[in-house]
């Protein structure tokens, strides 16, 4: 993945520094689907001086989004993992 948007650059930076997963949900146009996948950064191919990243992630768990809130430009969600 190439991470270039400011809101995602910070999210990925935090995930790498804290060794924590983050979630990816499907969005098509303005439609957001409330299912997603937790992912973990497994490899950083390149970290650019402007904070962009080229990374490899691995899916860990599927989830349903229970609720969301905005934190600046980033959507934060409460999720329920699918067993």
Image (cartoon, helix red, strand yellow):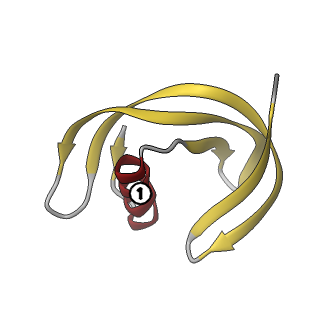
Q: Is residue 27 above or below residue 1?
A: below
Q: Identify the image quadrant of the C terminus.
A: top right
Q: Residue 78 placed where, x, y %?
A: 77, 54
- Residue found at the very far left of the displayed protein: 49
Q: Is residue 65 left or right of residue 2?
A: right
Q: Residue at x 18, y 42 (%)?
A: 46
- Residue found at the very far top of the displayed protein: 83
Q: Residue 33 placed where, x, y %?
A: 77, 43
Question: Which residue position holds label 1?
Answer: 14
The residue lying toward the viewer, choosing from 8 and 16, is 16
The residue tagged with tag 1: helix, strand or loop? helix
Q: Is residue 41 above or below residue 75?
A: above
Q: Residue 81 placed where, x, y %?
A: 78, 34
Q: Residue at x 36, y 47 (%)?
A: 16
Image quadrant where residue 82 sits:
top right
Circle 1 residues within 10 Å: few <14, some 14–19, many ≥20: some
């Amino acid at each position: 993945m190439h991470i270039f948007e400011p809101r995602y650059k910070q999210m990925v930076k935090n995930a790498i520094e804290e060794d924590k997963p983050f979630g990816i949900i499907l969005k098509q146009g303005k439609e957001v689907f409330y299912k997603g996948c937790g992912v973990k950064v497994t490899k950083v191919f390149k970290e650019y001086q402007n904070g962009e990243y080229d990374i490899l992630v691995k899916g860990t768990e599927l989830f349903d989004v229970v609720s969301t809130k905005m934190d600046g430009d980033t959507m934060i969600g409460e999720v329920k993992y699918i067993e």
